[in-house]
C-alpha cells in the first residue's frame, strides 16, 4: 500500500474515527485503525467491538492495499504537523513508514484478518430523517441515560421512529427525559431500538446541526447510520424498555412558570452548599414565590428566592439538584413549567408552553 495525502485531507476524518478507539481494549488490534486503499479512495475504520466508525476520503492511490495502523500514535503524529504538511505512506513488510518533509516515522502494523468488522447488515429497515431533528432529540434526552446499571436496557436511549414522528426516551429509574416531535421521516415501518450510551456519545460528537439528512439501517441487532462520508455501526441493547408513558403523572394540577435561566443560576449557587453525597435541594412553592434551600452536615446553608407565576397550593418538596440542572441545561426556552401534584409525587417539567419535551424527576427525602 502506498499513497500521499495532505494533513488537511487526513486529519478531520481521522479525528472523527479515532474517537471510537478506547484506551483499554480487549484485543490489541483494536488499538489500530483499519486502512483500506483502493485506486480512488482511502477508507479508515475504527471499532471498540460495540461501535464501529468508518469514513472514506477521495484519493488517488499509488498502490492499493490494506493494513492496520496504531490509531492514537498516528493521530498524535498528524496533529503535531503543520497544516501545510503532506504525508507519504508506504507499507513495507509489517511496518507503516510515514514521511513528511525531513520527518520520518515507522509504526508497527497488525494483520488485517484480526480486525473485527461488522460487514453488511441483512434484513434491515431503511429510514431517512433530518439530522437537525435527531440532534435536538438526543441533546434533550441523552443526559438521563443510566450508567452501568444492572438493568442493561436502561444504559441506552430508546429511539422510536414512525412516518413523520420522532421520539427519544431515556431514564435511569430516578428521572425520565422524553422528546417527541413531528419530523419529515421517510419509512415504511415503525422502528423501535435501544441505542447504547457509547453510540449516542459518538453520534452527538459527529452531528453538526446542519439540515442534511441521516440515513439509518436497522435490524434486530445493529443500527447503521450514514452521515455524508461517515458511517457508524452500533450493536443495539437487547431487552424491553420500560413503559415510560405510565410513569408520567397526568394529574399535576399545581403549575409554576419559572424563568429558566434565573432558576438555573439559583440552583447552581445553592448546589455549592448541598450535601455532597445526596445533592438535595428543597423547593418551597407559595403564591408568586419559589424558595430554594440547601444544607449539608457541616450546618452550612444556602437560601434563595425567585418570583414566579404560581397560584397553586403551598408545596414543599425536595429533589436531587443535579437532576434539575441537567434538565435546565438541556433545554433553551425562556421559561419552564413545573407541574407538581403534591410533595410525594414526581415533578413534570416542560420547557415553556411546549409539550415536545417532557421531564419527570422523582422527589427525595431530606
Image: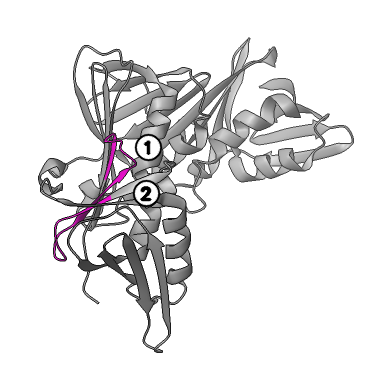
The label number, if any, that marks residue 143 in the structure image: 2
Q: Which of these two is toward me, 119 or 297?
A: 297
> At numbered mark 2, what does the secondary structure look like: helix, strand or loop?
helix
Q: Residue 230 in the image: x percent, y percent?
A: 50, 24
Q: Which of these two is toward me, 67 or 87?
A: 87
Q: Bounds of the magenta span? A: 338-358
Label pair 2/1, CB-CB below 8 angstroms: no
Give the residue drawn at x 72%, y 41%: 79
Q: Residue 238 in the image: x percent, y percent?
A: 20, 40
The label number, if any, that marks residue 138 in the structure image: 1
Give the residue drawn at x 51%, y 18%: 228
Give the residue drawn at x 32%, y 73%: 278
Q: Residue 338 in the image: x percent, y percent?
A: 27, 52
CA neighbours of label 1 inside 10 A, class few (<14), some (14 to 19), many (20+): many
Was residue 345 drawn as part of the magenta stretch in this picture?
Answer: yes
For residue 184, side relative to residue 7 (left or right): left
Residue 87 visible in the current orientation: yes
Place residue 270 in its image quadrant: bottom left
> At numbered mark 1, what does the secondary structure look like: helix, strand or loop?
helix
Give the residue drawn at x 37%, y 80%: 295
**N-term-proximal mark, 2 vs 1:** 1
Was residue 21 drawn as part of the magenta stretch in this picture?
Answer: no
Q: How is the image coloured?
A: one colour
For residue 264, side relative to residue 4 (left or right): left
Disc 2 and disc 1: Cα gap in Å?
Answer: 9 Å
Position of 353 relative to 189 (above/below)? below
Residue 117 visible in the current orientation: no
The label number, if any, that marks residue 38 in the structure image: none
Q: Quadrant of the C terminus?
A: bottom left
Q: Which of these two is toward me, 292 or 344?
A: 292
Place residue 34 in its image quadrant: top right
Amino acid at each position: 500500500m502506498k499513497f500521499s495525502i495532505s494533513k488537511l485531507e487526513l486529519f478531520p476524518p481521522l479525528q472523527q474515527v479515532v474517537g471510537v478507539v478506547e484506551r483499554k481494549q480487549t484485543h490489541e488490534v483494536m488499538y489500530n485503525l483499519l486502512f483500506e486503499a483502493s485506486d480512488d479512495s482511502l477508507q479508515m475504520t475504527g471499532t471498540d467491538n460495540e461501535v464501529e466508525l468508518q469514513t472514506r476520503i477521495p484519493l488517488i492511490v499509488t498502490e492499493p492495499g490494506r493494513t492496520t495502523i496504531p490509531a492514537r500514535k498516528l493521530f498524535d503524529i498528524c496533529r503535531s504537523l503543520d497544516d501545510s504538511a503532506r504525508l507519504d505512506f508506504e507499507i513495507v513488510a509489517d511496518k507503516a513508514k510515514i514521511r513528511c518533509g525531513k520527518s520520518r516515522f515507522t509504526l508497527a502494523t497488525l494483520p488485517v484478518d484480526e480486525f473485527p468488522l461488522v460487514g453488511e447488515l441483512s434484513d434491515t429497515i431503511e429510514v431517512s430523517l433530518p439530522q437537525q431533528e435527531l440532534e435536538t432529540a438526543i441533546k434533550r434526552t441523552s443526559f438521563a441515560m443510566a450508567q452501568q446499571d444492572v438493568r442493561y436496557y436502561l444504559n441506552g436511549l430508546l429511539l422510536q421512529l414512525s412516518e413523520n414522528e420522532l421520539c427519544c426516551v431515556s431514564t435511569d429509574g430516578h428521572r425520565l427525559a422524553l422528546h417527541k416531535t413531528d419530523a419529515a421521516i421517510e419509512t415504511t415501518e415503525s422502528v423501535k431500538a435501544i441505542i447504547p450510551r457509547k453510540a449516542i456519545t459518538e453520534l452527538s460528537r459527529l452531528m453538526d446541526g446542519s439540515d442534511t439528512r441521516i440515513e439509518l439501517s436497522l435490524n434486530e441487532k445493529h443500527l447503521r447510520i450514514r452521515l455524508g462520508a461517515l458511517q457508524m455501526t452500533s450493536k443495539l441493547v437487547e431487552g424491553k424498555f420500560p413503559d415510560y408513558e405510565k410513569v408520567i403523572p397526568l394529574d399535576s394540577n399545581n403549575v409554576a412558570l419559572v424563568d429558566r435561566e434565573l432558576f438555573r443560576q439559583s440552583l447552581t449557587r445553592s448546589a455549592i452548599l448541598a450535601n455532597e453525597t445526596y445533592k438535595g435541594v428543597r423547593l418551597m412553592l407559595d403564591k408568586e414565590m419559589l424558595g430554594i434551600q440547601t444544607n449539608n452536615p457541616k450546618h452550612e446553608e444556602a437560601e434563595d428566592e425567585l418570583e414566579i407565576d404560581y397560584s397553586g397550593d403551598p408545596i414543599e418538596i425536595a429533589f436531587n439538584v443535579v437532576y434539575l440542572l441537567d434538565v435546565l441545561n438541556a433545554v433553551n426556552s425562556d421559561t419552564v413549567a413545573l407541574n407538581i401534584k403534591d410533595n410525594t409525587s414526581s415533578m413534570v417539567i416542560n420547557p415553556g408552553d411546549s409539550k415536545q419535551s417532557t421531564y419527570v424527576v422523582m422527589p427525595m427525602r431530606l
